[in-house]
Image (cartoon, grey):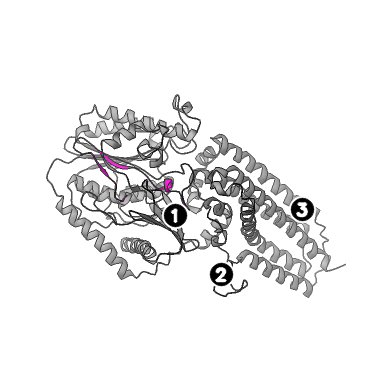
Amino acid sequence: MDKWHNIKECGKFVLKSHICFLLICMAIRIAEIITCSNLMLEISRNDYMKIAEGVLRGVVFDNAVSAIFLSLPVVVLGLLCTFGKIKKSILKGFAILIGILYALSVAVSVGNIPYITYKMANLCLADLSYLSKPGEMIGMMTGEPLYLAFFIVGWIIVAAIIYVIWEFAKSTNIIEEKESFFSWQNLTATVFAFIFCFLMGRGNNPPTNNKGAIFGTPLSFIFAIYSDDAFLNLSAQSPVFGLLKEVSHLGRKIETGITTEEAVAYANKIQNQTKASLADSLTKTKKKNIVMIIMESLSANYMTTFGNQAGLTPCLDSLFANSLAYYNAWSNGARTNNAIFSTQTSLPGCLNVNMLETPLNKDYTSLATVLSANGYSTDLFISHKKTFDNISVFFLAQPFDKIHSEEEYGYKEMEWGLRDSTLLAVALDSIRQLSKDTTKPFYTAILTCSNHPTFSIPSPYNEMYPEIEHCAVRYADASIDTFMKKAAKEPWFDNTIFVFTGDHGRLVGTPDGKVSSSLNHVPIFFYGKEIQPAKDSSLTMQIDLEPTILSILGLQCPEFAGLGINRMKMKRDTAVYTSNNYFIARTSDKAYFLNMDTNAGTLYNLKKDYSLSTPIEGNVPEFDRQIMLQVQALYTIQNREK
């Protein structure tokens, strides 16, 4: 029998599987572009050559993903053919493996489409934390018509690709050998096939600095940055390729180029100035209660105050107008766990890292630690289970006296637990009980959830607007309105300061740059009887909340170890935060975006409404250094606390 027969048959099977995967991925990418065309710049929508180029660049990433998946089957099948031990059952086993890997990739790519409409980003490892709540994850994917459509289509494609790969295996004509043998030709073919898979899986960025294509750098997302349209660049990428890259980089720190000594000096300067400002604020007045409400996906772009004409936030706009209000305020990250970490610890997050899992010890001077030491009771209210995102471990280490969660409520009204109106009512009842001890002030933090897919909005709010997202924002605002009106009748109200912010924003309208400003622009304001209303347009961040609250309360923090500043006494020149795969540094008139996939910088001038205009490509060393100083300072502080 021809010793080449089986290896040729295996080669045909692998090649057909590979081409099938590429075609399906290309179809998904085209569907993504059509579905999300509203995110494209107007000038790009009829530029079919540019769109086609993005699709073809995406094929390069899909090709690399498939090559990585096929490397093991190529080697094993090739070696079995080399020694005459190949079996049809073994080929079918690898068909199942390849089918599963391809199916998972397809599921990620299809699920990535609605995700882009929400975040203007591709899925990353941080999003896989949702796997810890499979019920909520499936509910989120099926709870909205658009998401449900993709959920159904995704399952159809998954089933189809598994079936097709299985049929390819069944039709492969493997002739099982009666006796073993060795074939140099088959071994040589196997080696070359593996090298080919390796080179495809490695990929290659365009040659630069006179380096040839063969010896250039491995494929990265710099290859997808080919136009001025942020969405087209995003659609040219592969979320599966990104996930594989992240997995390969797990445990690595960002190379900052900043020495530990420089980072310590940077952190000490901020901390010493903040501690000095708190010492100046020291007072012996009656301790105020604090209620902090962190609202899900509350982009400032939803508020009438910031130019939205849909009338979504009448209560929040009214409160904002009568508060110490920070207009130019930014979330430290684009995920809820970033906000929880930064508002409570005065520390920034790091890119695509769940900071709630970082090893800060119980002695760390978080807001709860300082308030607890000053006689405050500390409570947290969340709508979902406290195990999600490591919330229970993190907050109990701060320390919080109690975490109120789905486990305590015993029921839920939506996939993520309680709706905002119910959660706020539960919190209000608890505060009433706490307030009975007039000798002990309280700090209550509330994390809302109704403005998060899947949306479960009660009547009449669910029919107020054509867009379900607008209905969710309006309902969230109405829930705050009810809570504040009821709270105003309580005896503890006049002695309470209410702190409002969004955990992060959401993509609102058309992106104004590589990362939309709406993803991080959030309101931050302080409301209370003795709070003097004022408008502050200077830069503010979530990490500034802890020292600013302590200043308002007149409390010292001699061991303050955060990187925020006391906004009652200080102003910041630069705000550094993360969004998707970017570090962003803002000043009063400029915003600098550093892409951590490509290490490429883009500088924007700012409009009066803090949105972006006039991009200028190219790295700006002073901004690069400012970003890396903060990153290295965060690493240094964390290492101190281990």
Gap between marks 2 and 3 measured at Cα: 35 Å
Instruction: Assign a secondary structure to mark 1.
Output: strand
Q: Which callout, 2 or 1, points at the residue further toward the start of the chain?
A: 2
- Residue 18: give x, y in percent of width and height: 70, 57
Camera-side mark, 2 or 1: 1
Asked whether the residues under the numbered discs 2 and 1 touch, taking CB atoms below 8 Å apart as contact, a structural biologist would say no
Residue 201 colored in magenta in the image: no
Label 2 sits on a secondary structure element that is loop
Mark 3 or mark 1: which comes first in sequence?
3
Q: What residue does disc 2 label? A: 217
Number of other residues with Cα within 10 Å of mark 2, as a class: few under 14, some 14 to 19, many 20 or more:
some
Q: CA distance from mark 2 to mark 1?
A: 30 Å
**Residue at the location (73% across, 66% down)?**
78
Q: Over which residues does the magenta segment extend? A: 514-539
Image point (83%, 61%), residue name: 175
Point out the frontmost of discs 2 and 3. Answer: 2
Q: Position of residue 505 (x, y in %)?
A: 41, 44
The 10 Å Cα crowd at callout 3, few under 14, some 14 to 19, many 20 or more, is some
Question: Residue under circle 3?
Answer: 168
Q: Is residue 586 left or right of residue 156?
A: left
- As drawn, the residue found furthest toward the left would be 284
Mark 1 belongs to which amino acid? Thr
Q: Name the residue at the right extreme.
A: 1
What secondary structure do most residues of the magenta stretch adopt?
Answer: loop
